[in-house]
Image (cartoon, rainbow, N blue to C red):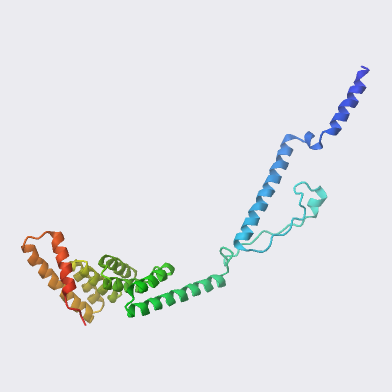
Amino acid sequence: MEDCPKKYHFIKDQMQKVPAAFFLPPLFLSFLIFSRATIEKVMATKMVWKSASKREKLRPLRNPNLPFETEEEKDEQEVLPPTEINPNHSGGKSLDSRSSEKDDMKQLFESLQSQGNQLAEAGKYKEALSKWETALNLMPENETVHEQKAQVLLELGDAWNSLKAATRATQLNPSWPEAWVTLGRSQLNFGEPDSAIESFDKALALKADNEEAKRDRQSAMQLVQKRKQLHSSGLSANKRRFIVADKVENLPENS
């Protein structure tokens, strides 16, 4: 029993050397570790968010040792009102900013389209196509540029891509007669006079006095008659199609 006081003092001395946090309940220790990790994660997230969207500067932490402040410090902290979401903002940009960007994009599109038109009129078809392709990257739903592309591609002898561009123009604006005329011409040059006649008929249904559609339809009818003659001679379907395409190139140009 005489050794008990000595053992007690020895244990007491050893306990003083151990950090106080050692005696905290494990659950509370877990809470402290989780809270600090959570705060560090949130702070890191906020820094990335600010840098990306250039919002207002983050407020400095009033108590950088959170959540290890005292109870008095907790009571002194102000309670911030909940953040309200502004429906007029998206991605950190105001409506005015987005409207300005839209106007700038439209002006650039119109400039590229105009440059393409001038190049096409000068016979620089490839350069014109380059301008129009860039314009369509800005506004891919513009039927006018698709139709212009189809015309220039015909001039370059690319009937297949011309057909695709003209088809897209008619899809975007089915009530545009000129787009159907261009599609009919592309189909003629691709060796499909039957499809061309249908396109010219659609153009005439929209505009009965369209002289270009009338003339080109007549050319398509002549090619159909020629194909019938070739069919009677026993040529295969592929040969007939290519021969018809050759005949299209030899037709007199419409004035």
The residue closer to the viewer here, 162 or 39, is 162
- When the figure is inspected, residue 22 is found, relative to residue 170, above or below; the finding is above
> Which residue lies at the image location 49% right of the left edge and 72% below the top edge?
102
> Which residue lies at the image location 22% right of the left edge and 79% below the top edge?
212
> Which residue lies at the image location 60% right of the left edge and 62% below the top edge?
53
Measured from the top left, where is residue 70 in percent x and y? 81, 47
Quadrant location, the C terminus: bottom left
| Residue at the extreme top of the image, as rendered | 1
- When the figure is inspected, residue 11 is found, relative to residue 244, above or below; the finding is above
Quadrant location, the N terminus: top right
Can residue 188 be seen at all in this image of the molecule?
Answer: yes
| Residue at the extreme left of the image, as rendered | 233
Q: Is residue 219 left or right of residue 7?
A: left
Measured from the top left, where is residue 181 in percent x and y? 25, 74
Among the 4 quarters of the image, the one containing residue 201 = bottom left
Q: Is residue 65 left or right of residue 187?
A: right
Can residue 174 be seen at all in this image of the molecule?
Answer: no
- When the figure is inspected, residue 165 is found, relative to residue 120, above or below; the finding is above
Among the 4 quarters of the image, the one containing residue 229 = bottom left
Q: How many marks?
A: 0
Among the 4 quarters of the image, the one containing residue 217 = bottom left
Measured from the top left, where is residue 105 in percent x and y? 48, 72
The residue closer to the viewer here, 79 or 194, is 194
The residue closer to the viewer here, 127 or 50, is 127
> Which residue lies at the image location 64% right of the left edge and 60% below the top edge?
50
Q: Is residue 214 left or right of residue 28?
A: left
Measured from the top left, where is residue 100 in percent x and y? 53, 74
The residue closer to the viewer here, 88 or 29, is 29
